Image (cartoon, helix red, strand yellow):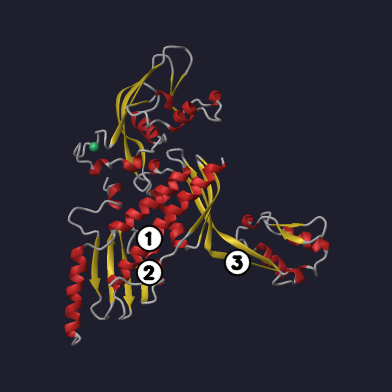
Amino acid sequence: MDGVSYQRFPKVKIREMKDDYLKFELRETDASIANALRRVMIAEVPTIAIDLVEIEGNSSVLNDEFIAHRLGLIPLTSERAMGMRFSRDCDACDGDGQCEYCSVEFHLHVRCDTDQTLDVTSYDLRSSDPSVVPVDVAQHSESTGYDASEQRGIIIVKLRRGQELRLRAIARKGIGKDHAKWSPAATVTFMYEPEIHINEDLMETLTLDEKRDWIESSPTKVFGLDPNTHQVVVVDPEAYTYDDEVIKKAEAMGKPGLVEIYAKEDSFIFTVESTGAIKASQLVVNAIEVLKQKLDVVRPSEETEEADDQFGELGAHMRGG
Amino acid sequence: MNAPDRYERFVVPEGTKKVSYERDTKIINAASFTLEREEHTIGNILRMQLHRDPNVLFAGYKLPHPLQYKIIVRIHTTSQSSPMQAYNQAINDLDRELNHLKNAFEEEMMRISREY
Ligand SMILES: [Zn+2]
């Protein structure tokens, strides 16, 4: 019954990898896979964010819901998120979403007793789980390459003398599709790798000034002039934005076909920037995992398949088989 | 006030089947799969994978309405296959492709971290 496989074997090459930035090449697959990965990274890879706030006291200038909203937007370190439960599927706390399997508790209590304005920041949040803390706090404690004096936390509100903020917050697992505060992606983009062919014979019919003029017609620096040979060379193919300007320019100069540019349909260059909730490289790995899980739940159930088998026999009878 | 809950977009309501299947009443080997709470992410990769199968004569998907959180995948095959067989094969192939991609990516991550 098993059919032949039409599987592909994509290739990956990482060009640059930092904690919150990743650039890589994806080859030998199609745009549907590239786009599915991009969409999943933005909207379906889970992270942890503050989702419920109980204000115990607030005499600041901002109202309660304004502060609750700001708390929700603070990115939290979310390495745990993939292994956590969504509160709505958690049976350990049936739906109230406040147990250790599906939530992390935060407390904040700040009071200003001086004449100087006091900043309430992400540093003032006290987490019940040391692995789930505001991203900037985690970077500060690692102190790797960050200037400590520049790290002042994310400002939540400012207090003047006598004002106080006191609250309890529950952070939960969620996805960007539900609310953008759960998206681990700052930006995820991909582009087709361009393939640029210069017609050298035709190019040599151009004067030096015409060459310069033609090179300048591109809004991005794709082409350049070799200072010694005065030949037009491709400086940076990926700077090309598929704007067609150089092609139009060549036609306007009466030199159609001076350059041909194709988008390689099975070759993509990805740029991934993370909010810091998870590492950019982990974001890609998690996206593949989430996509696999999504595929797994759209497999037809056995009863659906059996119903089809019976249907098939019935059909065969009707056709006289 | 009467806005639908946000989770309506991705949580399958109780008593609703994630995948349902309906054969075409007029055309042999044609059928539609309704996938609840899915959209372009799944619809487009399934469609493109189905196009790689030479026994698939037609494969397409639609999102009937932005407020109906489901997609419909329609498949028509030759008599050598069936919509159910082609659909299952497409999912298996995509799953294996993603396994391969995950391994390839993790190997590449190891290689890059060694360079630092
Ligand atoms: Zn729970």
Q: Quadrant of ligand 1?
A: top left
Residue contact between numbered discs 1 and 2, judged by CB atoms under 8 Å:
yes
Tag shown at residue B96: 1
Task: Give the residue type at disc 1.
Answer: Arg
Residue drawn at (77%, 71%) of the image: A201
Instruction: Evaluate whether residue A15 shows in this view.
Output: yes
Task: Give the residue type at disc 2.
Answer: Ser
Picture coordinates of residue A152, whole percent (x, y)? 50, 25
The single residue placed furthest to the top in the displayed view is A114
Gap between marks 3 and 1 measured at Cα: 30 Å
Chain at tag 3 = A
Chain at tag 2 = A
What SS does tag 3 mark? strand
Q: Give neighbour class at mark 2: few <14, some 14-19, many 20+ (Cα, 10 Å).
A: few
Q: Quadrant of residue A226?
A: bottom right
Gap between marks 2 and 3 measured at Cα: 30 Å
The single residue placed furthest to the bottom in the displayed view is A320
What SS does tag 2 mark? loop
Residue drawn at (46%, 40%) of the image: A275
The answer to whether A174 is drawn above or below residue B71 in the figure is above
Gap between marks 1 and 2 measured at Cα: 10 Å
Instruction: Evaluate whether residue A42 shows in this view.
Output: no
Residue contact between numbered discs 3 and 1, judged by CB atoms under 8 Å:
no
Picture coordinates of residue A6, whole percent (x, y)? 40, 69
Task: Pick the quarter of the image with the C terminus of chain A.
Answer: bottom left
Q: Which residue is mark 2?
A: A5
Picture coordinates of residue A265, whole percent (x, y)? 53, 65
Q: Give neighbour class at mark 1: few <14, some 14-19, many 20+ (Cα, 10 Å).
A: some
Closer to us: A268 or B5: A268
